Amino acid sequence: MKYFILYISYSPDFTQELYMKSKSMKHLLERIGRYSNGCLATSQGNINTNQVLSIYAREINPSSLNLNKTKFATINENKSYNAMDLA
């Protein structure tokens, strides 16, 4: 399992950080791209991807930041959707 910080920009003045875990960077970015026009549900809340300007992912070592691995969210694909899926 790999650990990441997602920097989610909603405006030039507001960026949110979200700690995520995934199989790999490629896997994480594929899942984010799949739901880029709708809702990305995670185990720690939802991201309305229609309102997101950009998402930047950076791989980290959780022990270097003194973070407990339970602080890292996972993508819940059963609750995520793309607006095109609803049409």
Image (spheres, grey):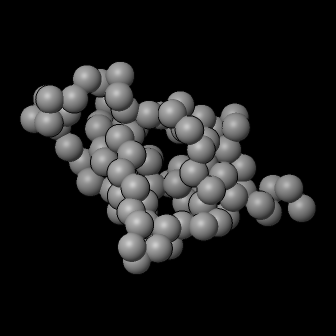
Q: Residue furthest right?
A: 87
Q: Residue at x 89, y 61 (%)?
A: 87
Task: Answer with left or right where residue 6 lies relative to residue 83.
Answer: left
Residue 51, placed above or below residue 5: below
Task: Answer with left or right where residue 84 lies relative to residue 19.
Answer: right
Q: Nearer the viewer, residue 87 or 54?
A: 54
Residue 25, placed above or below residue 70: below
Q: Quadrant of the N terminus?
A: top left
Rendering coords of residue 8 (x, y %): 42, 60
Residue 70, placed above or below residue 62: above
Task: Answer with left or right where residue 23 lies relative to residue 33.
Answer: left
Q: Residue furthest bottom?
A: 12
* Residue 36 placement: quadrant: bottom right
Rendering coords of residue 53 (x, y %): 50, 73
Q: Residue at x 60, y 67 (%)?
A: 51
Rendering coords of residue 22 (x, y %): 40, 37
Rendering coords of residue 48 (x, y %): 62, 56
